[in-house]
Image (cartoon, rainbow, N blue to C red):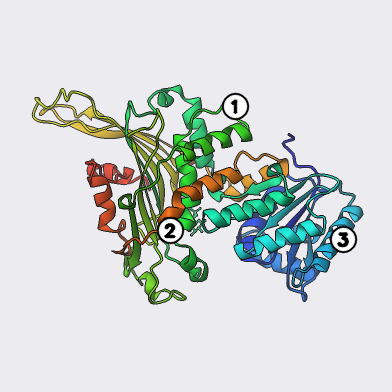
Amino acid sequence: MSTVPEPHVFVILGGTGDLAGRKLLPAIFHLSRDGHLSERSAILGVSRDEEMNDAAYRSWARDALERSGLDPEELAAWCDANLYYHAIGKGGPDEYRALCGRIEWLEKSLDLPGNRAFYLALPPGAFPSSIEGMAAAGLHRSTGWTRLVVEKPFGRDLETARDLNQILHRHFEESQIYRIDHYLGKETVQNLLVFRFSNVMFESLWSRDRVESVQITVAEELGVESRAGYYDTAGALRDMVQNHVAQLVSLIGMEVPSSFDADSVRYEKIKLLKAISPIRPHDVVLGQYDRGRVDDVEVPGYLAEEGVPSDSRTETFVGLKLEIDTWRWQGVPFYIRTGKRLPHRLTQIAVTFREPPVCLFESVGGCQTHPNVLFMTLQPNEGFALCFDVKVPGEPFALRTLPLDFYYRDAFGDMPDAYETLLLDILIGDQTLFVHGDWTEESWRLFTPILEQESAVHSYPAGTWGPRAAEDLLARRGHSWMGLADIREHHGLPSDE
Ligand code: BG6
């Protein structure tokens, strides 16, 4: 596997859409500017718009890239040199054959070897017909490599995910399919593997012998924004839990892979999901935000958001308890919470270790020990903090919890964008950070029953940490949600944000 992509054509189906303008083109531009792409490559935007042509597409892309704050002059030259456009109209068989002809023409005129990446930046309903259309026109094979990138959401439940995998596998090998979960491109998410498998100190504590519980919080301050059309038919379980959150569970819980290659890593992640016990209805809490205050600003409730039906029962919050039936994790609860309109943006994993078997210091002035907690903050202010007790100097004898911490921005400055990492991997042919077909089905196997059961949807005021029932979920085992910010505040330490 080379680390510099070979010359290729990058085809974006949905080339004039929001994802192309906001994420894909800026990422390709940065990769190209930083010298990661061969000069002999072309980007072909494809959409239904028959009025558009190469010149109009370049101008559309320039505007989109300028909104990302990039230098207009540099952009103009780059767009002119790299971007092409093809209208696919209604996407019938003739139109896919014409697309094939256009790609062959580009390859011939630019002297390219026939390597092609197709990115389905389309609404999920259009995936099956596009895959079939491409295959019928022979676009699933070429004289070089052909790779197909599929965006999330991957299916709506187990059955639709299976159907989609079947359609894909009818025409493409698994080794050609790159299912995207942008969380896997985040540096801090990748670093979970390095943290676990390169540092022997923690791996030796990483099991039921030492760990009391694991909590994963993926909180967003934002509400549904302008995406009600999609979001109201999805909800937090499909939008966040089945993919992003389940990926984090896999990375935290998986066994040590035999090597750091795509197959070994992905196999261990699938194995972990298979070992999760069916989720019991009373271990699930669904919520929907009501009006409230976020960042001191009054915000409307979900039902009052534009485009949301006034009787919608779509959940904007999910709290869950998972149990992993392996020798390593049996009996250790994995608590998950994710939601929109929570107090602030935070993706954080808290691993709480068991308390010492004997509390030696209780007799000295009644002071209590606290469990060690390892916080892995994936965003914002990415870093690690290990909280442990120290003696407060002087008398009376007292303990205080302090963090030993490390922040990425102090050590490394700015982080690369997840899409840059993932696009480069697609072009290089490294599938480690992409979702295997079997993983998607295992994940849906786990979460589909929740979609099928009648669950109460609790209301929570915007700007709070979700419904009260999400606290009760942990209280049953004597646990409570904990954030590094709370510990810092409790002990009078300055905020890390
Ligand atoms: C997307 C979801 O996949 O992830 C959005 O569809 C969510 O609803 C977003 O806001 C969160 O991503 P990030 O990178 O901002 O944590």
Structural distance between the alpha carbons of marks 1 and 2: 36 Å
Q: Which mark's residue is nearer the viewer, 2 or 3?
A: 2
Task: Tell me: residue 373, above or below residue 145.
Answer: above
The amino acid pointed to by label 1 is Ser
| Sequence-wise first label, 2 or 3 | 3
Q: Position of residue 382 (x, y in %)?
A: 45, 43
Q: Position of residue 406 (x, y in %)?
A: 42, 35
Q: Residue at x 72, y 41 (%)?
A: 428
First in sequence: mark 3 or mark 1? 3
**Camera sees residue 423:** no
Residue 177 disc label: none
Ligand 1 under 8 Å from disc 1 Cβ: no
Residue ID at (45%, 51%): 447
Q: Amino acid at mark 3?
A: Gly
Amino acid at pointer 2:
Leu
Label 1: few (<14), some (14–19) or many (≥20) C-alpha neighbours in 10 Å:
few
Compared to residue 36, the image places residue 281 above or below, namely below
Dot label at residue 259:
1
The residue lying at 75 percent from left, 65 percent from top is 58
Give the number of the disc on residue 101: 3
Badge 1 vs badge 2, beta-carbon distance below 8 Å:
no
Tell which tag, 1 or 2, sits nearer the viewer.
2
**Residue 435 position within the rendered picture, expressed as x and y whole percent measured from the top left:** 59, 45
Instruction: Name the element at disc 3.
Output: helix
- Which picture quadrant has residue 98? bottom right
